[in-house]
Amino acid sequence: MLSAKSLFQEILDDDESFRLFCSIAASGESQGGWENGRIAALLPAACRALAPKVARHGADEDKHGRIFHALMKKRGLKPVDVPPDTDYTMLLERNGIGLGHELLRGEQPLSEQDVVVYLAHSRVTEQRASEQMELLRKHFGADPGIGRAVRMISDDEDNHLAYCHEELLRLARAGHGRAIQRVLRACALAEIRVYRDVSLAVMAHMGRILHWPRAKTAAIAAGIHAVYVYERLAGWRRMVSLTMPERRDALGGPPVAAPGFA
């Protein structure tokens, strides 16, 4: 019977599929670290108080990238090039979601509207990251090989999501409420398309590595399309709601170290 646990167990047990999985994850996390670092440096004067939290967010993402590299090294594996069709971060940018890298490479300070776009984009993508890590934590949180790493990253992603909720609510109170809802909706609808496409690509690559039969690959693809249909009809709404989190000031301190990993 196909399940998220059984599929990931197959990927975890095989060196080549595990290496591809960790390489894709490490690349995305490192890219997020760079983006947050540049945003922290370019925040406008009115938003400078946010800089330590944005920098902390970036430091966490960098740490996650190092953790995935450490998991590969532990098994004597080296990273592989990330296939372009699995590059979630870059595909989001190409769909006009978030702040473009050309903007972030410059030295022009961001506008308050740019900060709204950044936080809305983060709120949507951190929802996805938090849910994915919670799923891995449920099934593999006690795994002797990856459990500790999964728990650490899951905690961080929950903090990132809480931070996005809190900061967007603060900006909504400052008069940006309509802009926030408009950007959140656009981000969510684009993200679910990109997530579907990346999921299909990742599973296709894994299927070739693990020699899955055609029927199994087709069943997995059908499941991914079914999730997309649900998200397109209603599931996207969970990505645009804003509620004050139980974890207040979740990124208010220094980055949490990852001894033994990074």
Image (cartoon, rainbow, N blue to C red):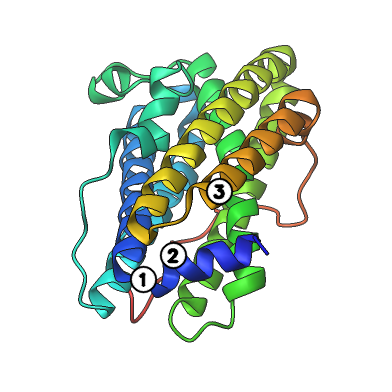
Type of amino acid at the residue the image marks with label 2 = Ile
Q: From mark 2 to mark 3, how far is it between C-alphas?
A: 18 Å
Residue sitting at x 72%, y 25%: 232
Name the foreground residue: 42 vs 203: 203
Give the structural element (helix, strand or loop) at label 1: loop
Can I make out residue 14 in this image? Answer: yes
Q: Name the residue under label 3.
A: 215
Residue sitting at x 32%, y 41%: 31
Q: Position of residue 94 (x, y in %)?
A: 38, 19
**Position above or below: 119 against 99:** below
Marks 1/3 in contact by CB < 8 Å: the verdict is no
- Depth-wise, is mark 2 or mark 3 nearer the camera? 3
- Please indicate whether residue 152 sits to the left or right of residue 79 in the image: right
Q: Mark 1 points at which residue?
A: 14
Q: How crowded is mark 3: few (under 14 residues within 10 Å), some or many (20 or more)?
A: few
Q: Earlier in the sequence, mark 2 or mark 3?
A: 2
In which quadrant is the N terminus drawn? bottom right
- Depth-wise, is mark 1 or mark 3 nearer the camera? 3
**Position above or below: 124 against 100:** below
Type of amino acid at the residue the image marks with label 3 = Ala
Q: How crowded is mark 2: few (under 14 residues within 10 Å), some or many (20 or more)?
A: many
Marks 2/3 in contact by CB < 8 Å: the verdict is no
Q: Which of marks 1 and 3 is nearer the N terminus?
A: 1
Type of amino acid at the residue the image marks with label 1 = Asp
Tag of residue 11: 2
- Please indicate whether residue 215 sits to the left or right of residue 11 in the image: right
Can I make out residue 126 in this image? Answer: no
Give the structural element (helix, strand or loop) at label 3: helix
Give the structural element (helix, strand or loop) at label 2: helix
Q: From mark 2 to mark 1, how far is it between C-alphas?
A: 6 Å
Q: Where is residue 72 in the image (x, y as percent from the top left)?
A: 28, 70
